[in-house]
């Protein structure tokens, strides 16, 4: 799975129309891994057990049980360009974790196994990630592609 730039507005509108839970992760001003992980935890409304490290982020993205029941979840990441430029290794790790989470939920949905949520009968991917293409994040985004 890869994340590429594309329109954010349509993704947000489609998620809203489908009744998905939308989580916004704004990376404006983030300059460290610790701050990135804090922002991730805040954006995800992560439970207290979220440990603020890469493994904990992967775990929290695979257990979204504390979120409201919904046919899907959309994580919209905005203002990420500076972080990606300034901390490319950490950005690559974040993208990998996000991609693995999308793949996990896609597999859970297909198999109706762990992670499948009530209301997923129409085959939608229960987790999608969009990366806003422009600073400010409202005009463009990235859609997961397999």
Image (cartoon, grey):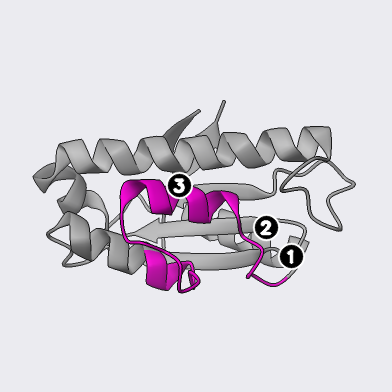
Is the C-beta separation of discs 2 and 1 under 8 Å?
yes
Does label 2 or label 3 sit earlier along the sequence? 2
Describe the element under mark 3 as helix, strand or loop.
helix
Rendered location of residue 105, percent (x, y): 65, 42
Q: How many marks?
A: 3
- Determine whether the residue tagged by mark 2 lies in a helix, strand or loop: helix
Residue at the spot of label 2:
14
Q: Which residue is mark 1?
A: 17
Image point 27% across, 62% down: which residue? 27
Q: x%, y% of residue 115? A: 71, 48
Query: Residue drawn at (51%, 57%), measured in percent from left and top?
Result: 75
Give the residues in magenta: 41-68
Q: Residues within 10 Å of mark 2 (few under 14, many from 20)?
A: few
**Residue 22 in sight:** yes
The mark that comes first in sequence, 1 or 3, is 1
**Disc 2 from disc 3: Cα separation:** 25 Å
């Amino acid at each position: 799975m890869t994340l590429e730039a594309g329109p954010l507005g349509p993704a947000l509108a489609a998620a809203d129309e489908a009744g998905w839970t939308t989580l916004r992760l704004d990376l404006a001003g983030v300059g460290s891994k610790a701050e990135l992980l804090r922002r991730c935890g805040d954006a995800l409304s992560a439970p207290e057990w979220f440990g603020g490290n890469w493994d904990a982020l992967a775990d929290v993205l695979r257990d979204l049980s504390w979120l409201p029941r919904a046919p899907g979840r959309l994580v919209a990441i905005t203002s990420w360009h500076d972080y990606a430029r300034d901390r490319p290794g950490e950005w690559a790790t974040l993208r990998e974790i996000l991609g693995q989470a999308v793949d996990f939920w896609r597999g859970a949905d297909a198999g109706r196994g762990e992670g499948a949520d009530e209301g997923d009968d129409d085959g939608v991917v229960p987790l999608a990630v969009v990366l806003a293409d422009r600073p400010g994040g409202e005009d463009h985004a990235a859609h997961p592609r397999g």
